[in-house]
């Protein structure tokens, strides 16, 4: 399996922040609501929505792998970010691709 990322895990990729952009786009319909308010009104996305958004964004294989590690289900913004960050940090790619909020 070929890796698209070259260099060390300390250099930022051209895809740095791409997952943050996807999370922001998925929850854009809720505007600038505080995450706790958005969760209180039931702001959720499905795993399938996240995977489709990642594929549509033409992310590198490593980031697609991170997204496909998500367990099936519905995600609040907080839960989605926690799951993605866990996988990103577990692969030591935080400095390369960035984490999400």
Image (spheres, grey):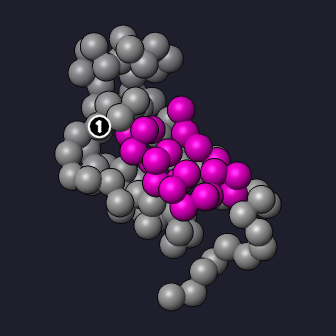
How many numbered dots are placed on residues in this image?
A: 1
Picture residue at 41% right of the left edge, 57% below the top: 67
Q: Report whether 34 appears left or right of 51.
A: right
Q: Is mark 1 on a helix, strand or loop?
A: strand
Q: In which quarter of the image is residue 48?
A: bottom left
Point 40% across, 30% down: residue: 78
Farthest left residue? 73
Res 101 visible: yes
User: What stretch of residues is rendered in magenta?
Assistant: 80-101
Observer-nearest residue: 35 or 90?
Answer: 90
Image location of residue 58, percent across then percent down: 52, 65
**Magenta-colored stretch includes residue 100:** yes
Q: In this view, does 7 lie to the left or right of 43?
A: right
- Residue at left offset 50%, top offset 17%: 32
Residue denoted by label 1 = 75
As drawn, 69 above or below 49? below
Residue 29: within the magenta? no
Using residue 27 as the reference point, say whether residue 100 is left or right of it. Answer: right
Q: Nearer the viewer, residue 58 or 1?
A: 1
Mark 1: few/some/many CA within 10 Å (<14, 14-19, 20+): many
Predominant SS of the magenta segment: helix
Percent position (x, y) of residue 70? 32, 54
Q: Which one is in front, 24 or 75?
A: 75
Give the percent coordinates (x, y) of residue 66.
Answer: 45, 60
Residue 25 in sight: no
């Amino acid at each position: 399996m070929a890796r698209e990322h070259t260099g060390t895990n300390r250099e930022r990729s051209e895809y740095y922040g791409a997952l943050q952009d996807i999370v922001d786009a998925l929850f854009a319909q809720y505007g600038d609501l505080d995450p706790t308010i958005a969760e209180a009104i039931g702001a959720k996305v499905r795993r399938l929505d996240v995977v489709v958004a990642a594929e549509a964004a033409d992310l590198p294989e490593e980031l697609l792998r991170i997204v496909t590690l998500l367990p099936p289900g519905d995600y609040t913004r907080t839960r989605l970010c926690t799951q993605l960050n866990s996988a990103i940090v577990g692969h030591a790619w935080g400095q390369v691709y960035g984490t999400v909020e």
